[in-house]
Image (cartoon, helix red, strand yellow):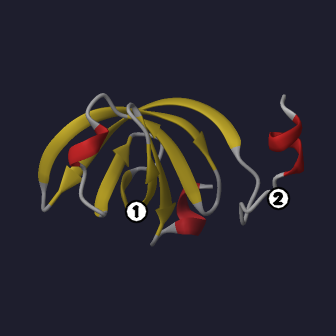
Amino acid sequence: MSDIAENLPNLRKSIRNHASLHGQIYFDGSLLSDCTIKNISKTGMCLFVPRVAWLPVYFEVSCNAFGGAIKVRKIWSRSDSVGVEIVNNKDEIY
């Protein structure tokens, strides 16, 4: 790891846990894309999404492990990944 990365503060609100879960992204009840949940915490997730650029700011992530859909807010995105903050149901998925 580089010296710069080692000196950056960890701004996460809770501990991440590695995951490799199949999920689906919905907006206004319509399926937008499949995704892979790469990691998850009580406050957010990192998703692998093939076409990240067109995702809205708010959307839902559905996964069998959640037993339903979780509303999230996009915080950051890269070419194939997106970081999201969970905006409801935080205690139900962790």
The three-letter amino acid code for the residue at tag 2 is: Pro
Specify the label residue 9 is tagged with: 2
Which x, y percent locates residue 43?
A: 60, 63
Which x, y percent locates residue 55?
A: 25, 50
Q: In front here: 8 or 90?
A: 8
Q: In front here: 3 or 25?
A: 3
Q: As displayed, is residue 21 above or below residue 26?
A: above
Which x, y percent locates residue 46?
A: 52, 43
Q: Which residue is mark 1?
A: 72
**Is residue 49 left or right of 8 when viewed as pictured?**
left
Q: As displayed, is residue 89 above or below residue 77?
A: below
**Is residue 85 left or right of 13 when viewed as pictured?**
left
Q: As displayed, is residue 36 above or below residue 16?
A: above
Q: Secondary structure at mark 1?
A: strand
Residue 69 quadrant: bottom left
* x 63%, y 55%: residue: 94
Q: As displayed, is residue 38 above or below residue 91?
A: above
- Mark closest to the chain's N terminus, 2 or 1: 2
Task: Pick the quarter of the image with the N terminus.
Answer: top right
Which x, y percent locates residue 37?
A: 48, 36
The three-letter amino acid code for the residue at tag 1 is: Val
Task: Report the mark closest to the observer, 2 or 1.
Answer: 2
Other-residue count near label 1 (Cα within 10 Å), few / some / many at <14 / 14–19 / ≥20: many
Q: Secondary structure at mark 2?
A: loop
